[in-house]
Amino acid sequence: MAGHPDASASRPVRLTLMETEPGEEVFFTGHPSWRSILAFYLKGLVLTIVAGAIAGIVTRATGRSVDVAWVALVVVVGLLIMVVAGLLRRISTTYTISSRRLAITTGILSKEHHETRLERVQNVNSSQSVVERLLRVGDVQFDTAGSADYNFAFLGVSGPQQIVRTVDRALRDLQQSHPGV
């Protein structure tokens, strides 16, 4: 899988949304893991069940019995909306690590792009809560030189330690190819 960090460790990923410069090599491109939005899906499931219960109460109040067809329709529509919203939420964010920069692109119709030059990265930290460790997801934060209004982080990525190693490898490659950096 192209977006999985284990796949990018052995060979560079060629498919990316970021336009690369001549000689620039892409080490990783991916999205937040589907496991990182399980809380979103759990909340959506609870809301769908509540909507189904409300549909049952309304159909019972307007007739002699609960109209199962209406309740089923409300639940199915609620589940479809939840799945599509979760998928859009996940695929609308793309993270990229190249031999020259880190990039975060968000959005479906309108796009927002943030990037930092690799040589500006001073520290790379990963964090995982207990639940995130069980789900094998976490966040990778990048401290960059200078002040920034943007919190540069890859959130909810699969295998955050592998992402840290990939950035470390990219930094080593950059320092070897440009010793003064």
Image (cartoon, grey):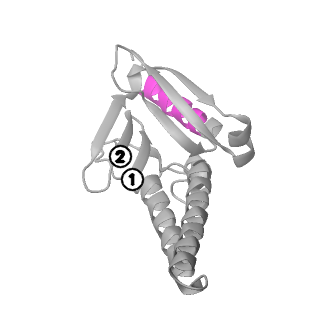
Asked whether 63 or 49 is in front, the reply is 63
Q: Which residue is mark 2?
A: 106
Residue 168 in magenta?
Answer: yes
> Which residue is at the front of the view, 41 or 115?
41
Q: Which residue is located at x 58 percent, y 74 percent? A: 56
Q: Quadrant of the N terminus?
A: bottom right
Residue 23 in the image: state x and y as whole percent: 33, 42
Marks 2/1 in contact by CB < 8 Å: the verdict is yes
Which quarter shows the C terminus?
A: top left
Q: Earlier in the sequence, mark 2 or mark 1?
A: 1
| For residue 20, above or below residue 119 | below
> What secondary structure is the magenta-colored segment mainly?
helix
Q: Residues within 10 Å of mark 1 (few under 14, many from 20)?
A: some
Query: Which residue is depicted at the point 69% across and 34% down?
Result: 129
Location of residue 46 with respect to 6 vertically, above or below: below
Please give the name of the residue rendered at 59% of the width and 86% of the height, measured from the top-left corner.
Answer: 64
State the residue position of label 1. 92
Kind of residue at badge 2? Thr
Residue extent of the magenta highlight: 163-177
Q: Position of residue 24 (x, y in %)?
A: 35, 41
